[in-house]
């Protein structure tokens, strides 16, 4: 009798473990999408992002206050260019928690919707809330973009400078910094930034053109 009970118990444990392992993991699906996207497999990445979204929807149905599900949901929506949906998800999530990750996703979504006023507001909130956050350098870059588009080049210079200080390996960011400095007449500063962009990407024609302009 004891052996029978033990056998049943072992079967229950094994079945529970099997289903626990099989439960879809939204974060893994999202990260897999990022890996596929980085490898140039854009359509496959969209599928993985879509699967992550569906998992998050189910998790939020079960628990509307699941902030992790809301976070990944927002990320995946942005990756699939569903920005208005991302805004809706983030706004609802912020009613549950002022999570800095949600704030940054909301700011990014507003940027892609060309709502620069709201984007800047939430980018600043993110930087204030998470000065050492994973996306702080990106937030500063977006702030620089907003200032550049509104022709506030001195402010763009400050924001881009913060971005490249935190993440110095992105050629586009140095190019944008060079452009901001060129627009305020800082030829030496622009030259330095364009040179950094070219060092990172030797075939960067726009940066080479900019460097030639400020050297002339």
Image (spheres, helix red, strand yellow):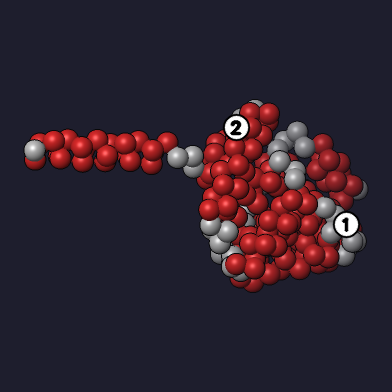
Residue for point 68% across, 29% down? 43
Q: Which label sits on residue 79?
A: none
Q: Which is more toward the observer, 184 or 30? A: 30
Mark 2, mark 1: which one is toward the viewer?
A: 2
Question: What residue occupies the far front of the structure in this picture?
Answer: 1
Q: Which is more toward the observer, 157 or 88? A: 88
Image location of residue 109, percent across then percent down: 75, 54
> Where is residue 42, by image quadrant?
top right
Image location of residue 114, percent across then percent down: 85, 55
Residue for point 27% across, 39% down? 12
Category of crowding for the residue at label 2, using alpha-carbon neighbours closer than 10 angstroms: few (below 14), some (14–19), many (at least 20): some
Secondary element under disc 2, as helix, strand or loop, is: helix
The mark that comes first in sequence, 2 or 1, is 2
Q: Which is more toward the observer, 162 or 214? A: 162
> Where is residue 150, by image quadrant?
bottom right
Residue for point 70% across, 38% down? 201
Q: Is residue 180 visible?
A: no
Query: On the image, numbered disc 1 is attached to which residue?
Result: 149
In the rendered view of the protein, which quadrant contains the N terminus?
top left
Q: Is residue 117 visible?
A: yes
Secondary element under disc 1, as helix, strand or loop, is: helix
Q: Which is more toward the observer, 213 or 205? A: 205
Q: Which label sits on residue 36?
A: 2
Image location of residue 180, percent across then percent down: 83, 57
Describe residue 126's horizontal placement relative to residue 15 as left or right.
right
Describe residue 23's horizontal placement relative to residue 51 as left or right.
left
């Amino acid at each position: 009798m004891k052996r029978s009970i033990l056998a049943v118990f072992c079967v229950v444990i094994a079945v529970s473990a099997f289903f626990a392992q099989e439960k879809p993991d939204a974060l893994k699906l999202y990260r897999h999408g990022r890996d596929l996207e980085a490898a140039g497999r854009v359509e496959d990445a969209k599928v993985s992002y879509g699967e992550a979204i569906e998992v998050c929807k189910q998790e939020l149905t079960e628990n509307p206050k699941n902030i992790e599900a809301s976070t990944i949901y927002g990320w995946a929506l942005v990756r699939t260019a569903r920005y208005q949906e991302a805004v809706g998800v983030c706004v609802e999530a912020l009613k549950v928690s002022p999570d800095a990750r949600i704030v940054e996703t909301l700011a990014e979504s507003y940027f892609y919707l060309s709502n620069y006023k709201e984007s800047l507001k939430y980018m600043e909130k993110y930087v204030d809330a998470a000065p050492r956050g994973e996306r702080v350098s990106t937030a500063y870059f977006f702030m620089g973009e907003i200032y550049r588009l509104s022709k506030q080049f001195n402010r763009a210079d400050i924001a881009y400078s913060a971005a490249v200080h935190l993440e110095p390996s992105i050629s586009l960011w140095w190019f944008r910094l060079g452009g901001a400095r060129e627009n305020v007449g800082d030829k030496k500063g622009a030259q330095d930034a364009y040179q950094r962009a070219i060092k990172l990407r030797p075939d960067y024609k726009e940066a080479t053109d900019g460097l030639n302009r400020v050297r002339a």
